Amino acid sequence: MNPQVLETIKTLPVAERIQLIEDLWDSIALPQADFALSEAQEVELDHRLTALEQNRSCLRPWSEVAAKILSGR
C-alpha cells in the first residue's frame, strides 16, 4: 500500500475508518460462484451432508451449545 494513502487513512475519524474497513471487506467478499471447490472438497462436503441428514438427532440449538460452553461442561 502506498504509505501516503495509509497516512491519510490514519487521519480519518474512527467511525470513517471502520466504514472504510467494511467497504473494503464488502468489495472482496465475492459471491460463492467465484470460488471453485476441488473435487476432493466436493466429495467431503457431500459426505458431511449425508452424515448430517442420517443423524439429525446429534444437532443441538446454539443456545444449548453456548450454555454448555459457558458453564465449562
Image: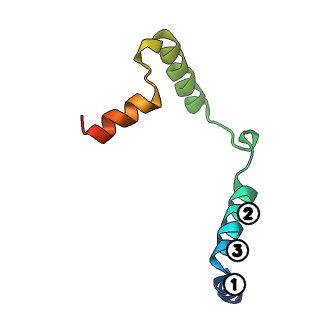
Name the spot of residue 5 as percent of width and height, x first.
71, 84
Front: mark 2 or 3: 3
What residue is disc 2 on? 23
Q: Secondary structure at mark 1?
A: loop
Callout 1, which amino acid? Asn
In the image, residue 25 sits, relative to residue 45, either above or below, namely below
In the image, residue 10 sits, relative to residue 21, either above or below, namely below
Name the spot of residue 48 as percent of width and height, x first.
50, 22
Question: Residue 42 occupies which quadrant of the picture?
Answer: top right
- Residue at 70% x, 52% y: name it: 29
- Residue at 39% x, 36% y: name it: 66
Q: Secondary structure at mark 3?
A: helix
Q: Return the residue nearer the eye: 17 or 64.
A: 64
What residue is disc 1 on? 2
Q: Real-space Cα distance between discs 3 and 1?
A: 19 Å
Q: Residues within 10 Å of mark 2 (few under 14, many from 20)?
A: few
Name the spot of residue 62 as percent of width and height, x first.
46, 31
Q: Return the residue nearer the eye: 57 or 51.
A: 57
Q: Quadrant of the C terminus?
A: top left
Callout 2, which amino acid? Asp
Q: Earlier in the sequence, mark 1 or mark 2?
A: 1
Of the numbered discs in the image, which one, if any, rests on residue 16?
3
- Left or right, 18 with respect to 54, comes to right
